[in-house]
Amino acid sequence: MPVLLAAGLLKRQRGWYDQAALDYSRAVELAPENSEAWKRLADVNNLMNRPDEAVTTYQQAIRFQPDYYAPYYALGRFYLVREQYREAEALFRRVIELAPGLAAGRIGLGLAQQEQMRLSEAEQSLLTALHLQETAPVLTDLGWLYYAQERYGEAAQYFEKSVNAQPPTALRYADLGDAYRQLGRVREAADAYRQAQSLAASEIVENPIEPSARANLAYVSARLGERSEAEFEIRQAVAIGPSNTTVLRLAVFTFEALGEHEQTLKLLAGAPRQLLEKLSRQPELRSLQQDPNFQKILTTKVHQ
């Protein structure tokens, strides 16, 4: 059993999700009461865009170990990514009940509250998480919260801490570049975007079928004025992850940064309502928000 779990983890890390799923499926056959094996199988189902199977297997993990926080947290993250915020909030509250000293539960709760526009509650949840443990994720999430409120100076402070807290990621450097750009710190923004570009390229080498890394590379390339690189990578990202909301969001920001407004509208015609609503609150997309065509797409989705 441990051999199957280890083999599945290695294959998952290399992007061989179907092979990892076979290892984890064999593991739950041999030990159907093993909650961790069910959770890992659910994670891979999620990565392979099998949402119904993912939910079923997460629920199996919970059934076999109802007092263990990890399956609740994983399912909460699943719902958070899919913008089912009430479901995510309920699961993160259960995580907090089971593991009150775990910062991750508070972070998840804060993100779910933020997406429901309960910003003061979100800030409190994230600050509580920060008090429990100062990590790059909570520093990043606080930066996002303040960025969304156009408190760019505070956002930059948290993003600066986030890139120094742990081994940095492309996404964290991109966030820092955005905050510097909003503050008019042009040279520092370009430096942060270049760091993000280098890290994103490394992530793609490690896992070529991960669309979010390509989307992030496209976005920072657009911010650096590298049009051909940005256009190539964002089309690759959308082709690999056409229903991935993170990819679609970054595609919108990329096309808008490139001035390709028609491409943005074309992409959003098939986007989910929750993503459109989120974009309608982004402070730096005001030009898009004021476009009658965007308003028409949003209104149509809301009434569907």
Image: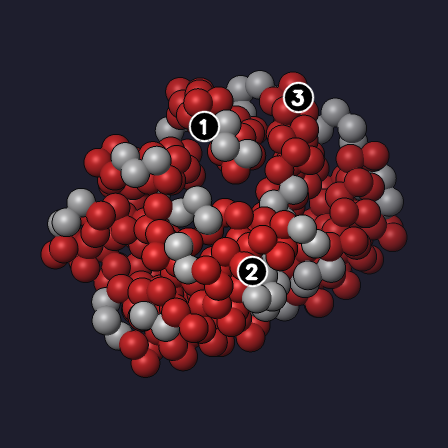
Name the residue rendered at 78%, 31% in the picture.
Answer: 65
Name the residue rendered at 44%, 73% in the picture.
Answer: 263
Query: On the image, numbered disc 2 is attached to which residue?
Result: 297
Of residues 187 and 117, the one nearer the viewer is: 117
How far across and down, in percent of the image, does residue 220 sit?
31, 63
How far across and down, in percent of the image, does residue 187 sit?
12, 56
Query: On the image, numbered disc 3 is attached to which residue?
Result: 98
How far across and down, in percent of the image, does residue 218 sit?
37, 69
Position of residue 92 in the picture relative to residue 114 (left or right): right
Q: In the picture, which quadrant includes the C terminus?
A: bottom right
Position of residue 76 in the picture relative to residue 161 (left or right): right
Three-letter amino acid code of the residue under disc 1: Leu
Neighbour tally class for label 1: few under 14, some 14-19, many 20 plus, Cα within 10 Å: some
Tell me how far mark 2 sits from mark 1, CA to CA.
Answer: 26 Å
Disc 3 secondary structure class: helix
Quarter of the image for residue 73 reads top right
Position of residue 42 in the picture relative to residue 167 (left or right): right
Tell me how far mark 1 sits from mark 3, CA to CA.
Answer: 25 Å
Query: On the image, numbered disc 1 is attached to which residue?
Result: 119
Report if the CB atoms under discs 1 and 3 are less than 8 Å apart: no
Mark 1 and mark 3 lie on one chain; the one further toward the N terminus is 3
Evaluate whether residue 287 shows in this view.
Answer: yes
Tell me how far mark 2 sits from mark 3, CA to CA.
Answer: 42 Å
Three-letter amino acid code of the residue under disc 3: Leu
How far across and down, in percent of the image, does residue 254 sit?
37, 65
Name the residue rendered at 75%, 43% in the picture.
Answer: 58
Three-letter amino acid code of the residue under disc 2: Ile
